[in-house]
Image (cartoon, grey):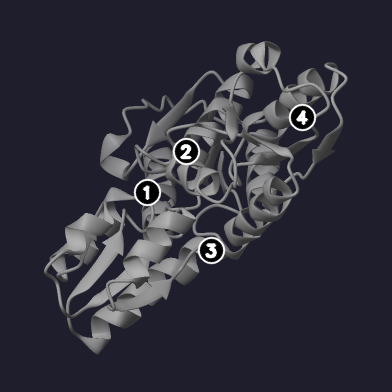
Amino acid sequence: MEVVTAKSAGFCFGVKRAVDTVYEEVEKGGPIFTYGPVIHNETVIGDLEAKGVRIIHSPKDLEGITEGTVILRSHGVSRKEEEEIRATGLKVVDTTCPFVKRIHRTVAEESAKGRQIVIIGAADHPEVEGIRGWSETPAVVIGTPEEAEAFECEEGKEICIVSQTTFNATKFEKLVAILKQKSYTIICVNTICNATHERQTEAQEIASRADIMIVIGGRTSSNSAKLYEICRERCPKTYFIQTWEDLDAELDGNEKLIGITAGASTPKRIIEEVQSKCLKKLLNKC
């Protein structure tokens, strides 16, 4: 019997950078605001709120506030939102993931050249909402084969395709393949970050061998949900949990391998707790 935890599980570079920055600003004192949840993990957000950090959802929420620090979330914000926040005169700390910033620049440049921007991702995800806000013209979001099939573009107009950084890599390729069948002139920039690709590949490999697979992540975490989807395809007994208390899997002692992975917004201590308690349960069954 063994418990295998993915080496890539947990905070990615961008998330760790954002979370560390918020805690550093808390130590400096003064009112701290994050524009949207800095990451999608309720445990981390709850701890930050307990330290006095407030979440705002619109630049209007800052009206009447004359001091404090506004932290732009790791998912990024639209150009308009950033300009309005900076116009308040409050201190602004930008923790947008550098890989997301790269997409903002690409979208701004390519749309300025007259190309139609197509974003492969979830339309209601904050990262995608922010990316859309950097396009000079209305961008199109595609997240399913049906949406890709239905897509139409003005004749003669070139298309620039980018992706949400945490999108399922296999699905991205399938959607791009559908769009390429339409004979448009396409520039495709695969902006799925390396950490996401590595995490998905490793989860897939472990799940293909596991008797039970556990995916740890926040309920609103897009990349964690995609990990669950990938693992479930290869291991029917896949569980999606936020903390150890959420796990309702019954171990009968016949499990040869329990696999564990976690989304980019899952703290290390939660991963270690799940790992240690799984091991303890297995030992008790021996």
- Please count the marks in the image: 4
Looking at the image, is mark 3 or mark 2 earlier in the sequence? Answer: 3
The quarter of the displayed image where residue 77 is located: bottom left
Element assignment for label 4: helix
Looking at the image, is mark 4 or mark 2 earlier in the sequence? Answer: 4
Looking at the image, is mark 4 or mark 3 earlier in the sequence? Answer: 3
Label 1: how many Cα within 10 Å (few below 14, some 14–19, many 20+) = many
Q: Which mark is residue 276?
A: none
Element assignment for label 2: helix
Q: Marks 4 and 2, how far apart in space? A: 18 Å
Q: Is residue 9 at least partly visible in the picture?
A: yes
Q: Disc 1 marks which amino acid? A: His
Q: Disc 4 marks which amino acid? A: Glu
Residue 232: image location, x then y, percent: 55, 23
The quarter of the displayed image where residue 3 is located: top right
Which image quarter is the C terminus in? Answer: top left
Residue bearing mark 3: 14
Q: Marks 2 and 1, how far apart in space? A: 8 Å
Residue bearing mark 2: 222
The quarter of the displayed image where residue 93 is located: bottom left
